[in-house]
Image (cartoon, helix red, strand yellow):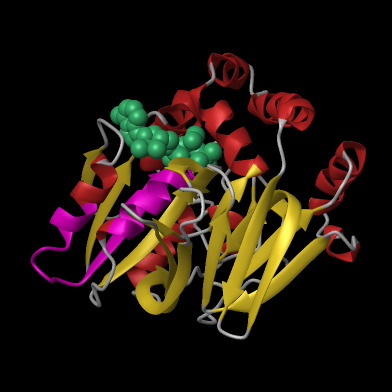
């Protein structure tokens, strides 16, 4: 099986490159190597790599954004297995999916031609655009926080001192004071309901988001379903408590938290609300026009990790 590694040298605010320099010295197999040079480059590289249909292990070395981009490039490629080595800031992918931690695991996988598992992919279909998501997508408070964190200079500065998570905390606090609730109608094949004073709605393919928060404990990326987590009618102080409890998956006991599983959710907001897919800004909703969140099964394969 051919092996290709795609490295995002900028992930983890540049720490990915240093990690790669150490990591590569311990790999004991031959591989093709590509370094990404811009956003979305990993998707283009990944789809080029699988053009010939040859059996291939394609390894993404970077953060959640790099994993997302590589997977997006190999959807519906039955001969391609994706492996991920987490080297980003949040690394939620590695919490919800099997991922390689050590070079020895990669060596062992390559030499034993290890197994793979078929995985689901999420889609957001909006009036003008389509997006995919591997981990989760959502609208509202968290999307606005992600938007601010990603464009902020504060994050870059704090990342230099390994304090990137502080940037997230800073913007959560700031947004907590300024955020304006919205009205949201949720439709799924069995149910339709309108919620007032909504903070956010997250649609999950796997349990984790925001750098380790277990927002959707029952999500399973191989079950053909997605889960919505919706938070509404909550005071600002209680929302803060909720965020603390999310790390342990205990927020589901709050009466203001609604969770449902389905294959499709249509979300309609009364005003324009920030949207994200896998923590990246994905434009804003159009008032009174539904966004459709769906999932498709068996769209890509992940390497099953063997302990060294
Ligand atoms: N050479 C490059 N220069 C600038 N940006 C790049 C380059 N290569 C990839 N990118 C972009 O870097 C962004 C961030 O990458 P990634 O998400 O992997 O790291 P991270 O943000 O540090 O990690 P995490 O998402 O786990 O917090 C991605 O959206 C990707 O498009």
Q: Quadrant of ligand 1?
A: top left
Instruction: Say whether residue 138 is magenta.
Output: no
Residue 106, horizontal then vertical, whole percent: 42, 58
Residue 45, horizontal then vertical, whole percent: 20, 48
Looking at the image, residue 233 sits to the left or right of residue 73; the answer is right
Total marks shown come to: 0
Residue 137, horizontal then vertical, whole percent: 53, 55
Looking at the image, residue 222 sits to the left or right of residue 7; the answer is right
The picture quadrant where one finds residue 302 is: bottom left
| Above or below for 268 versus 90 | below
Looking at the image, residue 199 sits to the left or right of residue 160; the answer is right
Residue 146, horizontal then vertical, whole percent: 57, 36
The structure residue drawn at horizontal position 80% and vertical position 52%, both measured from the top left corner, is 246
Please state which of residues 192 and 108 is positioned toward the viewer in this rendering.
192
Looking at the image, residue 158 sits to the left or right of residue 131; the answer is right
Instruction: Say whether residue 48 is magenta.
Output: yes
| Above or below for 254 versus 270 | below
Report if residue 148 is visible in the image: yes
The stretch in magenta equals 46-72
The structure residue drawn at horizontal position 51% and vertical position 45%, both measured from the top left corner, is 275
| Residue at far bottom of view | 190
| Residue at far left of view | 52
The structure residue drawn at horizontal position 62% and vertical position 45%, both measured from the top left corner, is 140
Image quarter in which the N terminus is found: bottom left
| Above or below for 244 versus 187 | above
Report if residue 62 is visible in the image: no
Please state which of residues 204 and 78 is positioned toward the viewer in this rendering.
204
Please state which of residues 73 and 188 is positioned toward the viewer in this rendering.
188
């Amino acid at each position: 099986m051919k092996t290709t590694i795609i490295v995002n040298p900028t992930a983890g605010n540049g720490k990915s490159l240093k990690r790669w320099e150490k990591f590569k010295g311990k790999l004991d197999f031959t591989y093709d190597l590509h370094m990404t040079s811009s956003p979305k480059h990993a998707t283009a590289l990944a789809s080029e790599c699988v053009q010939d249909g040859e059996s291939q292990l394609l390894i993404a070395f970077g953060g959640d954004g790099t994993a997302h981009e590589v997977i997006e490039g190999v959807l519906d490629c039955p001969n391609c297995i994706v492996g991920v080595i987490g080297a980003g800031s949040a690394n939620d992918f590695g919490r919800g999916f099997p991922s390689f931690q050590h070079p020895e695991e990669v060596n062992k996988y390559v030499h034993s031609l290890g197994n793979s598992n078929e995985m689901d992919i999420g889609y957001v279909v909006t009036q003008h655009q389509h997006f995919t998501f591997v981990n989760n997508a959502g609208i509202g408070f968290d999307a606005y926080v992600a938007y601010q964190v990603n464009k902020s200079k504060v994050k870059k500065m704090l990342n230099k001192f390994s304090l990137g998570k502080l940037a997230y905390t800073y913007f959560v606090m700031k947004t907590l004071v300024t955020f304006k609730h919205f009205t949201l109608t949720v439709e799924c094949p069995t149910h339709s309901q309108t919620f007032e004073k909504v903070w956010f709605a997250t649609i999950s393919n796997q349990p984790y988001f925001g750098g380790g928060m277990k927002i959707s404990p029952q999500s399973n990326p191989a079950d053909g379903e997605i889960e919505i987590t919706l938070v509404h009618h909550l005071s600002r102080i209680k929302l803060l408590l909720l965020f603390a409890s999310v790390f342990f998956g205990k927020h589901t006991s709050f009466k203001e938290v609604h969770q449902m599983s389905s294959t499709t959710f249509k979300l309609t907001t009364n005003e324009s609300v920030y949207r994200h897919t896998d923590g990246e800004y994905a434009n804003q909703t159009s008032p009174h026009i539904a966004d459709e969140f769906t999932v498709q099964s068996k769209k890509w394969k992940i390497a099953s990790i063997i302990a060294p």
